[in-house]
Image (tube, rainbow, N blue to C red):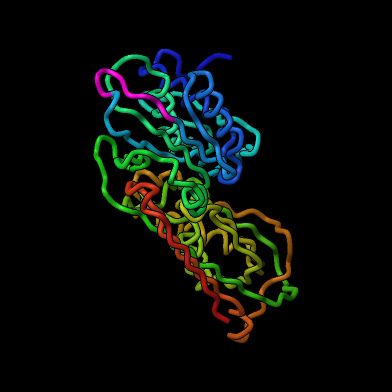
């Protein structure tokens, strides 16, 4: 198989990274990539241990006069966020990522690349495979399920570690060490609606083309959120052309800025509504940053249903359940920072 990254240096780092793009490794599906790390350690004659959560620790002796130095712990996570555009056919449980080089950038066709945290995994494997040089003893810790709550890091047996100095290779800045701990907060709200038939034409409104990105490292750039943007467009359009909402879907991961959203609705003036949505979208383009110039909002006839949400609902029926989940996740602070998980329900 032809290698996309052949000839790029450091060769071992790029070789390992490309190998990782061929291994499906969404959160909770890390066995194959965990076994790959173990196989590499075995080939290199290194001590390793894999636990029940598919975390892996690999040890390498020091060299170049640092054989007796205190070990340094390096860590990164094996799992990736599985994001793709709606029009891309890709099964993250079995398909390799389709990568290509565009100038100075390594890109994919409509899916996440997996550099978070495939870069760290490739760096550690490349270091473990190096011969000679000068470094202290290394303990490379590969954790799992980082993107969905740090389950791997929280379940790892830290008594296996011998070092006291840790470097987490999952920071978001190049060539800048970071001392911090990132957090995430999740809210789950369940609405119960009654539906009824409505006269008119069913339409599907699709918003696509936004850049999106990691909600932790790209949130400050001013990129639009597809859910908020489509809701805003529909809200403005409804002031001129009435319609009834049937459904609304947007985003797929809590740690990715939503790039696409779709609404299904029913109106008695489909042409007027389409014209109004086109006008609003054109006006909104003036406030977009360059990253989001690919914005497209399309209105097509048809939808899965003409049954729409009733106009009035009691508050108790609208909000029968609210769950809040707070997850403080270690980032550059490393897995020894631990994790805090709190959850409660309001009725």
The magenta span reads 59-66
Residue at x 37%, y 50% (from the top left corner): 336
Asked if residue 116 lies left or right of residue 193, the reply is left
Q: Quadrant of the C terminus?
A: bottom right
Query: With respect to residue 241, does 314 lie above or below?
Result: below
61 w.r.t. 309: above or below: above
Q: Main secondary structure of the magenta part?
A: loop
Percent of width and height locating residue 305: 74, 63
* Residue 42: percent from left, percent from top: 53, 22
The residue at 29%/52% (across/down) is 180
For the residue pair 40 and 199, the one nearer the viewer reads as: 40
Instruction: Please tell me which residue is depicted at 29% across the width and 40% down the height of the picture.
Output: 165
The answer to whether 339 appears left or right of 19 in the picture is left
Q: Quadrant of residue 264?
A: bottom right
Query: What is the x, y in percent for residue 189?
Result: 56, 71
The answer to which image quadrant residue 275 occupies is bottom right
- Check the image and report above or below for 283 versus 315: above
Count of labels shown? 0
Q: Is residue 286 visible?
A: no
Residue located 59% across and 59% down the image = 249
Q: Magenta includes 296? A: no
> Residue extending furthest front?
68
From the viewer's perspective, is 126 left or right of 67?
right
Location of the N terminus (image quadrant): top right
Foreground residue, 278 or 322? 322
Give yes or no for residue 63 being in the magenta stretch.
Answer: yes
Indicate the position of residue 245 as horizontal and vertical percent values.
62, 69
Q: Is residue 112 visible?
A: yes
* Nearer to the camera, 71 or 263: 71
């Amino acid at each position: 198989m032809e290698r996309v990254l052949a000839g790029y240096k450091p060769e071992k780092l790029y070789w390992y990274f490309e190998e990782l793009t061929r291994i499906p490794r969404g959160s909770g599906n890390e066995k194959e990539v965990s076994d790959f790390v173990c196989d590499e350690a075995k080939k290199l004659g290194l001590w390793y241990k894999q636990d029940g959560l598919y975390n892996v620790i690999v040890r390498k002796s020091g060299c170049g006069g640092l054989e007796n130095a205190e070990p340094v712990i390096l860590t990164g996570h094996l799992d990736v966020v599985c994001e793709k555009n709606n029009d891309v056919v890709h099964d993250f449980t079995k398909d390799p990522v389709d990568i290509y080089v565009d100038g100075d950038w390594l890109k994919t066709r409509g899916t996440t690349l997996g550099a978070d945290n495939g870069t760290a995994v490739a760096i550690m494997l490349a270091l473990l495979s190096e011969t000679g040089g000068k470094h202290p003893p290394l303990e490379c810790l590969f954790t799992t399920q980082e993107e969905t709550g740090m389950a791997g890091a929280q379940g790892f047996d830290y008594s296996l570690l011998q070092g006291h100095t840790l470097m987490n290779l999952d920071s978001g800045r190049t060539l800048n060490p970071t001392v911090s701990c990132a957090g995430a907060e999740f809210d789950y709200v369940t609405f119960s609606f009654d539906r009824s038939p409505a006269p008119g034409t069913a339409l599907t409104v699709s918003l696509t083309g936004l850049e999106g990105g990691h909600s932790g490292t790209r949130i400050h750039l001013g990129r639009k959120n597809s859910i908020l943007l489509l809701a805003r467009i529909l809200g403005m359009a409804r002031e001129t052309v009435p319609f009834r909402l049937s459904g609304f879907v947007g985003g797929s991961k809590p740690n990715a800025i939503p790039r696409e959203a779709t609404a299904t609705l029913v109106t008695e003036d489909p042409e007027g509504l389409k014209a109004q949505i086109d006008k609003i979208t054109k006006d909104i383009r003036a406030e977009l940053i360059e990253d989001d110039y690919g914005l497209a909002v399309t209105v097509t006839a048809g939808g899965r249903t003409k049954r729409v949400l009733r106009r009035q609902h009691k508050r108790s029926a609208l909000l029968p359940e609210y769950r809040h989940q707070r997850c403080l996740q270690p980032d550059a602070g490393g897995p020894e920072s631990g994790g805090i998980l709190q959850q409660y329900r309001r009725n």
